[in-house]
Image (spheres, rainbow, N blue to C red):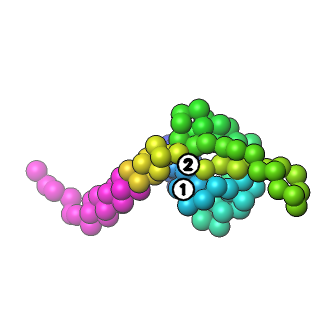
Amino acid sequence: MARDLTVEGVVRSALPIAILAALKPQATHGYALIELLSTQGFSDVKGGTLYPILARLEQQGLVRSAWDHSQSGPGRKMFTTTTEGDRLVDAATKAWQDMGQTLKNLSTLGVVQS
């Protein structure tokens, strides 16, 4: 089986959308984002994977960042989705739901004999 067709490959391909979805409700810093993703099945995400994706999403106008200079510790870079990022999350969520239904339908059909 090709590597991209494994469960890990599917999860890896969904990571940018998962990052956007996790950022949609509120601004989050990188470490908290890694922790959140880990609780939702993206357990192998490390900073070396996350931060390049965040940079690419920011370049694409889907994410914006700002420094939070809290008095309780060092400043942290906070990330949140843009309006365009929110739209993409909504469209991707619908597409994944549709694909899930299609796969479910296909897996319950019998083979058609010609």
Where residue 62 sits: x, y (%)? 53, 41
Where residue 17 sits: x, y (%)? 51, 49
Image quadrant of residue 93?
Answer: bottom left
Q: Measuring 67% from the left and 56% from the top, which residue is drawn there?
A: 28
Can you say whether 57 is above or below 72 in the image? above
Report if residue 105 lies within the magenta region. yes
Looking at the image, which is closer to me, 72 or 53? 72
Position of 95 compared to 35: left or right? Answer: left
Q: Residues within 10 Å of mark 1 (few under 14, many from 20)?
A: many
Can you say whether 105 is above or below 2 in the image? below
Q: Amino acid at mark 2?
A: Thr
Residue wearing tag 2:
81
Looking at the image, which is closer to me, 112 or 35? 35
Q: Amino acid at mark 1?
A: Lys
Where residue 66 sits: x, y (%)? 70, 44
Can you say whether 3 is above or below 106 in the image? above
Where residue 100 sits: x, y (%)? 36, 60
Would you say the magenta stretch is mainly helix, strand or loop?
Answer: helix
Whether residue 10 is visible = yes
Position of 28 compared to 113: left or right? Answer: right
The residue range painted magenta reads 92-114
Residue wearing tag 1:
24
In the image, farthest residue toward the left: 114
Query: Is the residue under label 2 in contact with that under label 1 (CB below 8 Å)?
Result: yes
Give the structural element (helix, strand or loop) at label 1: loop
Q: Residues within 10 Å of mark 2 (few under 14, many from 20)?
A: many
